[in-house]
Amino acid sequence: MTWSTADIPDLTGRRALVTGATSGLGYETSLELLRHGAEVLIAARNPEKAAQRAGDLKQASGREPIVVELDLADLTSVEKAADRVRKSYDKLDLLVNNAGVMATPYRQTVDGFELQLGTNHLGHFALTGRLLPLLLKAPSSRVVTVSSFMHKTARSIHEGDFRRPEPGYSKWVAYGKSKLANVLFMLELERRARAAGANLISAGAHPGYAATHLQTHGPELAGRSIEARVWTGINKLVAQSAAAGAWPSLYAATNPDLRPGSYVGPGFFEYRGKPAIALPSRTAQDPELAERLWTWSVAATGVDPVLTVPR
């Protein structure tokens, strides 16, 4: 595939919300959306950092993004953020569920969920559900959920994983399950959108191996500075840039010919390079598991995403 960011169409008049937009993939995704004319809302946990990065984005693109305070590890914060967006805007054309944490030490969210599943999946599930009314008001909307090739390491997921206790906890197992949940959710949202006749596309993306703060956040959170420095060195040697890592997300978000339910990753062995259609794991394509995950997520978050097409 010869795609580049120059192939992104004019996005004037389209409104996008990107989570985790203060660094890495989210920042680069927001930058290109702004450069191509979109109105961009950047959702981030730290308002001071978000304001600073909004200034950087304005300087780099010539267009100023709008900051939305959002902590995906706090369902009350998710509700408040979605309420602010719904009260301020009449539609939302694009939601990029990008934010995430990776291989963190055992932690719980504000609501008592295992941190990685709570942040990477449940936070985005609740956000998407609460923003669906705005997405369904757009003539043609899209939800892009960012996963990882690490989803293929997870062979199952259970409701008990949401509140798994610390004994026996594996940070990498939990991360793989959170990324599996992302793909299962993406595909189930697509199935439900088609069944409802909604003019909404649900798609997925993963960055391959891109140098972002994601690799060092877990060790930093655990106070392991040496491990964080090792990851920084590895990134410099073998990872592609965050800008290149954002290409699959941008392709999934903007390609007018994208098939609903597509999962996009780097074309070179899903490791690096230009975006290409990737194949999720067999477990991630299990519709019965996806439906169960949806039911568990509704019970956990109290949010029941309903795809009702406006008349």
Image (cartoon, rainbow, N blue to C red):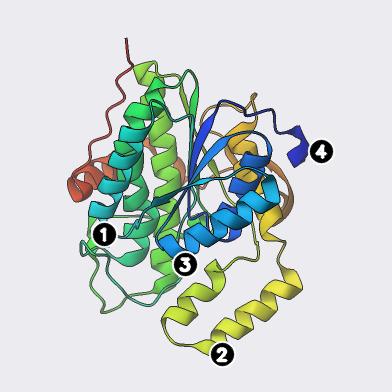
Find residue 45 and report its horizontal and vertical position in percent: 39, 60
Q: Can residue 44 be seen here?
A: yes
Asked whether 308 or 297 is in front, the reply is 308
In the shown orientation, is residue 96 left or right of residue 62?
A: left
Q: Are marks 4 and 2 in contact (CB under 8 Å)?
A: no
| Other residues around mark 1 within 10 Å, as few (<14) / some (14–19) / many (≥20) | many
Q: Residue 62, relative to residue 200: is it above or below?
A: below
Q: Badge 4: how crowded within 10 Å, few (<14), some, or many (20+)? A: few
Do callouts 1 and 3 mark residues in contact (Cβ within 8 Å)? Answer: no
Residue under label 1, please give it: 162
Which of the two discs, 2 and 1, sits closer to the camera? 2
Which residue does the numbered mark 3 point to in the structure image? 102
The circle drawn on residue 2 is: 4
Counting residues from the N terminus, which is met first, the one under dot 4 or under dot 2? 4
Callout 2 crowding tier (Cα within 10 Å): few <14, some 14–19, many ≥20: few
Q: Do residues under tags 1 and 4 come within 8 Å of each other at their CB atoms? A: no
C-alpha span from label 3 to label 4: 31 Å
Q: Dot 2 corresponds to which residue?
A: 226
**Foreground: disc 1 or disc 4:** 4
Q: Three-letter amino acid code at disc 3?
A: Met
Name the residue: 62% across, 52% down: 57
